[in-house]
Amino acid sequence: MLLTQREEKQLEASVDSLISLVALTKNALQSFIYKLENEYERLTWPNVLDNFGLLSGQLNTINKMLKNEKTPSFRSQVIIPLVLSQKPDDDLTVLTEQRVPVFSHEIVPDYLRTKPDPEVEEQEKQLSTEAARIGPDVAQKQIQALNKMCSNLLEKLNNPRDDRDAESAASRLNKPSFNPGDTNALVAAVAFGKGLSKCRPPGPMAPGHPGQGPMMSGGPTLQQVTIGGGGGQQAGMGGPVAPQQQGQPGKMPSSIKTNIKSASASMHPYNR
């Protein structure tokens, strides 16, 4: 069917309008993809929603233009390739933004296809067959489950952000930051020595006294103690020095004798 001159002009104007709208949509989509890949750290959720709203509005504008009564039906128009060549075409490269450099037999079936690929058609047939096998009751249950999931998701998204922040803060505060069992074990070990191993100081054991090691540098020593008028007598540091008894000048008290004997016994390596 041949078109009149008026219809040809109307078709050209519609195609130009469609090309401009598609170009705007393509630029908006490219800008959004660039932000997602390079500016994701500064990108906020309101900005993402704004970009989605922009793309949705542009697609709706294209649909309205295609459904308009004044727009000619593009489905009735047939595109026939007149020339196919294996040589690169500069005008075609610029027109397609470097995507199609050659209009050859290899790419024409893909770009001028009016039906989906055979693989896609096969997948659509499989989905249609599976959908036909599902009974009405099973389909209704699946629809209700999907609606419930969508309702819960919308409810969570519509909740104020302050409420979500308050809930997350409360969960962080209620979460324990220590282990009570480890704390109790540490307190018992420090206060009562619970769980600590009994170790002996290093060194050879003295024969005849198991459990008694050699005298260490910080152990008990003997010091000179002056008793009454006796200038050359010695006593041990093991206890307090008793005062000199009256009527017994120069006599060493019994407690000091006992301390001297114990200290001498501990210092002798062969004492049994």
Image (cartoon, rainbow, N blue to C red):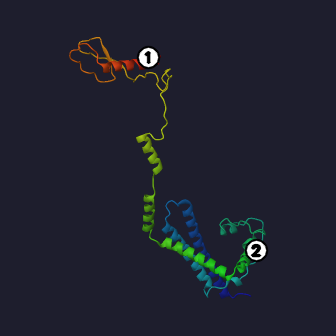
Q: Which residue is mark 1?
A: 268
Q: Amino acid at mark 1?
A: His
Question: 39 or 215: which is nearer to us?
Answer: 215
The answer to whether 93 appears left or right of 183 in the picture is: right
Where disc 1 sits, the SS reads: loop
The answer to whether 143 appears left or right of 222 in the picture is: right
Residue 186 drawn at (x, y percent): 45, 44
Residue at the far left in the pictured view: 246
Question: 39 or 107: which is nearer to us?
Answer: 39
Q: Quadrant of residue 232?
A: top left
Residue 69 drawn at (x, y percent): 61, 88
* Number of numbered discs on residues: 2
Residue at horizontal 44%, vertical 47%?
Answer: 184
- C-alpha span from label 1 to label 2: 103 Å
> In which quadrant will I find the N terminus?
bottom right
Q: Amino acid at mark 2?
A: Glu
Question: 201 or 68: which is nearer to us?
Answer: 201
Where disc 2 sits, the SS reads: helix
Q: Which label number is shown at residue 122?
A: 2
Callout 2 environment at 10 Å: few (<14), some (14 to 19), or many (20+)? few
Q: Is residue 269 above or below residue 199?
A: above
Question: 58 or 160: which is nearer to us?
Answer: 160
Q: Which label number is shown at residue 26?
A: none
